[in-house]
Amino acid sequence: MEHTYRLTISCPDRVGIVAKVSQFIAEQGGWLTEANYHADAETTWFFMRNEIKAESLKLGLDAFREAFAPIADEYGMEWNLVDSQQKRRVVILASHASHCIADLLHRWHSDELDCDIPLVISNHENLRSMVEWHGIPFEYVPVDKNNKAPAQARVMELTSQYRADCVVLARYMQIVPPEFCQAYAGRMINIHHSFLPSFIGANPYQKAFERGVKLIGATSHYVTEQLDEGPIIEQDVIRVSHRHSKEDMVRLGKDVEKAVLARALRNHLEDRVLVKGNKTVVFD
Amino acid sequence: MEHTYRLTISCPDRVGIVAKVSQFIAEQGGWLTEANYHADAETTWFFMRNEIKAESLKLGLDAFREAFAPIADEYGMEWNLVDSQQKRRVVILASHASHCIADLLHRWHSDELDCDIPLVISNHENLRSMVEWHGIPFEYVPVDKNNKAPAQARVMELTSQYRADCVVLARYMQIVPPEFCQAYAGRMINIHHSFLPSFIGANPYQKAFERGVKLIGATSHYVTEQLDEGPIIEQDVIRVSHRHSKEDMVRLGKDVEKAVLARALRNHLEDRVLVKGNKTVVFD
Amino acid sequence: MEHTYRLTISCPDRVGIVAKVSQFIAEQGGWLTEANYHADAETTWFFMRNEIKAESLKLGLDAFREAFAPIADEYGMEWNLVDSQQKRRVVILASHASHCIADLLHRWHSDELDCDIPLVISNHENLRSMVEWHGIPFEYVPVDKNNKAPAQARVMELTSQYRADCVVLARYMQIVPPEFCQAYAGRMINIHHSFLPSFIGANPYQKAFERGVKLIGATSHYVTEQLDEGPIIEQDVIRVSHRHSKEDMVRLGKDVEKAVLARALRNHLEDRVLVKGNKTVVFD
Amino acid sequence: MEHTYRLTISCPDRVGIVAKVSQFIAEQGGWLTEANYHADAETTWFFMRNEIKAESLKLGLDAFREAFAPIADEYGMEWNLVDSQQKRRVVILASHASHCIADLLHRWHSDELDCDIPLVISNHENLRSMVEWHGIPFEYVPVDKNNKAPAQARVMELTSQYRADCVVLARYMQIVPPEFCQAYAGRMINIHHSFLPSFIGANPYQKAFERGVKLIGATSHYVTEQLDEGPIIEQDVIRVSHRHSKEDMVRLGKDVEKAVLARALRNHLEDRVLVKGNKTVVFD
């Protein structure tokens, strides 16, 4: 994977933003390997992602940031500059179900996900062996009715201790406290096992089965304090019919869940997802 | 299209139904061109569709019905026997939007839909010329706040007068009164412009746009008194992204709507859809 | 639809292209409603599409061209500047099958396709009434074994006489002579009824049926002198199974064909398709 | 998973087959949990799959077979009766790539694939640890230009020694000798990394990249002596664009490959795939 800097920007739209930014990049010798722009007509907000060959730049990361800051100020930009070689640290929270985490770990193991996975936390022990086979520490933090608060505190403590840049809820199935959501706003990714906003809340496959839908789906979104209401990163569906029992839907749904979560995480790790309000721009 | 009899059955599941029915058919010399069976484990209800070459049968339609009735009684069957050459009469209700009705009329014109279309009713005049070009009568029944009841009565009167076997709401966008729903229970098909149960009610594309979903869809269902709650016959989706405005979603959604409605109607016309409670079995 | 200028560019990749072009646009006051960039790593070729609000520009079309020419020269650009209000003239060639042309005409009639359709040419008479209902002239140019050359000449003559900017082969099913391909290179769009490069040549559904494939498809491509070998603009597929006869495949395939052709044409008309060698960049 | 007997039949079509078979099943007290029928109009061949609750039957497997044989003879049936509790033994052949085998092993580990996996054979060592973590023996059989025949002999010997009922080529990438194909006719499943018949042979992603297709795919088929020509069980595709390099296609293709192979194998293990000539009937 090529060594690049990724510059993501969002700001109020006006004439000349692309010119200003690309002029700046060109002045630093920056060779664009990819550039994406989106002007949102509804909000008149502008979004931009530039991927620049690191070796083409005359400046290092800090000098680039310093030199770019005045432009960012002038245009009222929210912006971020990332070095593709600084791997993000992704802590995964899982529960009993193995399909999403097995898929993520295999992709990571196969160099498909460009990140470190310093820790997996689960409220069940059953995934320990699989996680540890990958050389990743596994922490068991059981949750029951009586220990929710201390369990949540322990999860947050571990996440902090392992310096997570990003948290993935790989079918974690436990409530995440507001302070955790806030601490990882735009950096905590959940996979919901329905095509949101259909079947919000618990037991979506049961509800889908009862409603007799002909497609079931999954949704990956950033976690906010409102359950299942955060900005959607990716969704997909699969066809079902009367021949499928609720158990079949659960089984078929797994394939959609893991695919959707993996695509969402990959896009997040490549800084392709920009959030504005409750919506995302995904430059994939 | 081959001349066939279609025998559809649903009844409580038990040992020997297939044997009994297929034995009966074989005794009449019936050559099965297609046979479908579904045993629903949840409801322990059994569904069956047999398509039989008409020329292979020793019996005509009425004699077949008479001879089969004792078996149906013995097994507590709800059943139906249809002659594929007796074309169903489909009255289409439309509003201003042309995409669904243009699609249906073209398919009918191209012999893709095996039915007669004796009448199109609309609360706008704009589709008259297109409908009449197809040689189909067009009735304009305007609806406004003050004439809803008489307009509804007129629609029902026309539907009855033209002896509709089936009513299709091709983006009709008007409330259908309960007595109309009841009169055409299991024979009135609607296309809803969302992936139900997401975005029930009005303006689904606006809601989809606001929620930032990554797929939009359409749902064809039998109309019941509960708005958007009837048994789903067919659904499909199409991918959207941040690049799509609400207007783009409306445009892209049209393609899904017309495809979903056409598939639902075709399956209905071929007696492939069996309803049980609020769900369908679709032997496609 | 907003009045815009569309500037499409392709050239050898190097540092500073985006800066140079966007700087120029900004200097003219140009407000970008959409901008797309692609740097092809394999060919080190760069592709760019800018859509600019016409009213934001200080320059008219000709003045813009004149002012931009030196930049284009400096960077060795192939480029094009289009006024979105100058509708392209699309001549459609059809044969007996109606599904693609009916779909295109309905989209055009519904303002989904931003073009004029000054003429439809067919080697059969059966579509005349449908075409003329849309207010479009219809020319019947029969083709048989003995008149191929004069028929081809007549088609080219008519296309020229009606000043076609673009030619669409909507299941025309006749060989197009090399000089016609050359005259409309990059402006003549065909729909092939298979998922190319599978089943090149005649009777693809028959071949698909015999091979027992589980998906069938369609391909829209620019026409070149090599049959079915031109740059692909769009493709799609639909699922089939053992239950589908060859006739079913033909029927199901129609829906894919018309959808694929409509998407390809729409992208072409919006100057979203850039050709390089035998491949396309589609900024959709 | 319920204990069932699966009776699959194919024979020349005629009146009364369903009656005869279902009559027989009913006489033995057989409760059908699923029944599928297909009459192929082209070949006038009939296909049937019956799944019967084991506990409902008065007969054991051998007695059922003996009692059914006269019917089978009368109708010229090719038939098979399988006890769902007798797990099939699946030997997997892999090479260096891990995605398909990791997916299969995880599904097996999660009880999604109803089989035993007594052995994995590979011509590389890199997968040993992953395989052995699952408690499955791993045999390394290197292949090079000079040892092809003995390597093939060793693979066949191991397959035989571990009493494989079914062989899966999970991106094995080595030629399989004719006698191996014959020994496992209809029981050896390959995954080809293209949408066959597109891009037969080596390097399909390279070819797809060069041709500029807009969808790439994968095909699972029974292995025959003709490379990539065997009966297709399952296919699927994924959308690509100019933004995707050949490496991206390889990566995206992996997801299609593993999904297609898993679905094909699952259907095979549930006796849902019936082969006739070079085509399959898949009762999914």
Image (cartoon, coloured by chain):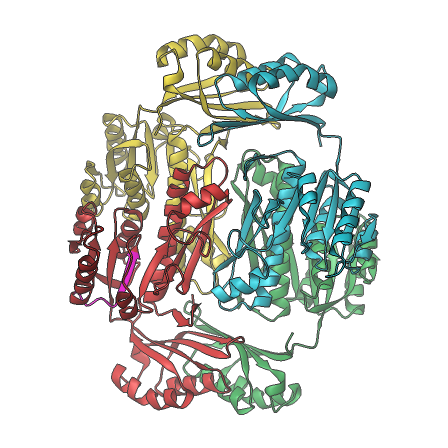
Chain colours: A red, B cyan, C green, D yellow
Vertical placement of residue A4 versus B13, above or below: below
Please provide percent x and percent y for residue C201.
62, 47
Q: Which residue is drawn at 29% across and 78% down?
A: A55
Please provide percent x and percent y for residue A167.
27, 63
Vertical placement of residue C212 versus B18, above or below: below
Q: Quadrant of the N terminus of chain C?
A: bottom right
Please provide percent x and percent y for residue A204.
41, 48
C128 on left or right of D250: right
D250 on left or right of C50: left
Question: Can residue B280 be seen here?
Answer: yes
Vertical placement of residue B33 versus C115, above or below: above
Indicate yes or no whether the magenta region holds residue A166.
yes
Q: Quadrant of the C terminus of chain C?
A: bottom right
Closer-to-camera residue (A3/B83): B83
Indicate yes or no whether the magenta region holds residue C157.
no
In magenta, the rendered stretch is: A162-169
Q: Residue at x 61, y 91 (%)?
A: C58
